[in-house]
Amino acid sequence: MNPFNILFEHLQSTIDLNVEQLALIGNKFKEKKVKKKGFLLGAGEVSKHMRFIASGCLRSYYMDENSQEHTLQFGIENWWVNDLYSYLTGSPSNQFLQAIEESTILQIHKDDLEILIGEVPGIERFFRLKIQSAYVTLQERMLDNMSLTAYDRYVDFRNKYRDIEQRVPQYMIASYLGITPEFLSNIRKNAPR
Amino acid sequence: MNPFNILFEHLQSTIDLNVEQLALIGNKFKEKKVKKKGFLLGAGEVSKHMRFIASGCLRSYYMDENSQEHTLQFGIENWWVNDLYSYLTGSPSNQFLQAIEESTILQIHKDDLEILIGEVPGIERFFRLKIQSAYVTLQERMLDNMSLTAYDRYVDFRNKYRDIEQRVPQYMIASYLGITPEFLSNIRKNAPR
DNA sequence: ATCCTTTCTTAAGGTATCTTAACTTTTCTG
DNA sequence: CAGAAAAGTTAAGATACCTTAAGAAAGGAT
């Protein structure tokens, strides 16, 4: 399926859009392919785009002073990925946005998004809702991290993201859960079933 | 100072408002006093209000299955406190919103806020920006929790929230940092200076 | 098919943080 | 101001998770 049609369907699941509006939207989003291990954003750059995954799989991660990677988000088809921090504040990102599989992205520049919002007001509502649910998800994760053991977090992850679990290497899952790959391995060995 | 004037000044630091608009806003917000240790929201209730602290000090916390408290947020004058999760999704809260000092709150009901947004469009922008910065703050905290040691998180907390540190009991700070009060005590003892 | 790279596992020893419990200090209440 | 309640400290023993290092397995490239 054409990447743009994937985007259109995705948008229409939340807001109503007529043909002219879809055309306006299609004009502003640009298609971008990323190879496996390719980067859409590197630490130090300012994120200037909102990015929609039409196909493939990516993750964003933060690298701390000890060069440890911390995965912030995975994303597959129909997800949005970005360093919202950098995008919203305009400050240089401290994250990397990297493809785990060859992926097709549709992205819109911040300036174009502002224009588009003027043309298609529903878009503003769409992104407000996105940010809200991003917040809600993040808070849930924060609470889980504070109150659950690594094993429980792993079980929750598997239940919540079974589709993602198959597609990403285990050490990235470990870095998402906030543990070392060795310890995740250990957890898996001693897990029931 | 009158609580409403504190709110008005706060709003005007972000958006422009004329006298009629301030009157409309003043009509919709209700003043509420909470005694020390009093609750504005309990687990199980749905949060139906946006809440502004005109004076005092509060915190929101989550209580896990082992009855451990996890402080999500502290708030003092000019801050907004809420369980955004519950407010946005309409699901019952898993948090408590409790006063640490006697406090004066100005709160607006969700339905009234929607009406108000119709009357004063700038208000929508205001809350969108609030949620965005809440997201940004939360992500920063998430990263800190994943990459820093408890000692470093404590130092960061002191630097960032010196004004709050004076006003809240230490065991709440511990529950914010994700450690036990005993361990925070230990950290403080062994800390430089 | 084979070699090289990436990912995963195993296990021993170490460290950050927790648990428990008793004690001290501070704050609140009447 | 006294007594009770809340908050903070101390220290010993426990545990979840990390570090290191080496080897096994899987995946990619030629």
Image: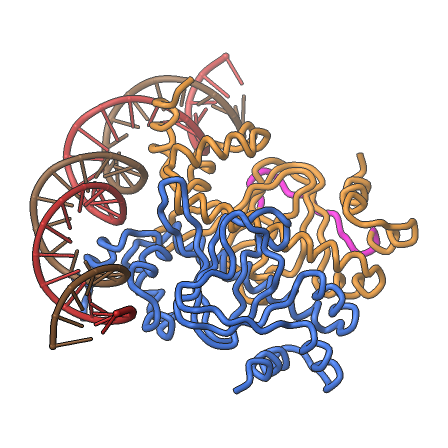
Chain colours: A blue, B orange, C brown, D red
**Residue B129 left/right relative to A136:** right
Query: Is residue A173 visible to us here?
Result: yes
Q: Quadrant of residue B76?
A: top right
**Residue A160 location, x and y as percent?**
39, 70
Query: Is residue A153 visible to us here?
Result: no
- Region in magenta: B26-38
Point 71% across, 61% down: residue: A111
Q: Nearer the viewer, residue A97 or B72?
A: A97
**Residue B66 location, x and y as percent?**
34, 52
Q: Nearer the viewer, residue A119 or A157?
A: A119
Point 82% across, 41% down: residue: B5
**Residue A75 left/right relative to A162:** right
Point 43% across, 70% down: residue: A57
Is residue B30 shown in magenta? yes
**Residue A138 left/right relative to B28:** left
Which quadrant is home to the C terminus of chain A? bottom left
Is residue B56 shown in magenta? no
**Residue A40 left/right relative to B25:** left
A64 lies above or below A164: above
Q: Nearer the viewer, residue A53 or A166?
A: A53
B142 lies above or below A26: above
**Residue A148 location, x and y as percent?**
34, 54
**Residue C8 location, x and y as percent?**
21, 63
**How many tags in the picture?**
0
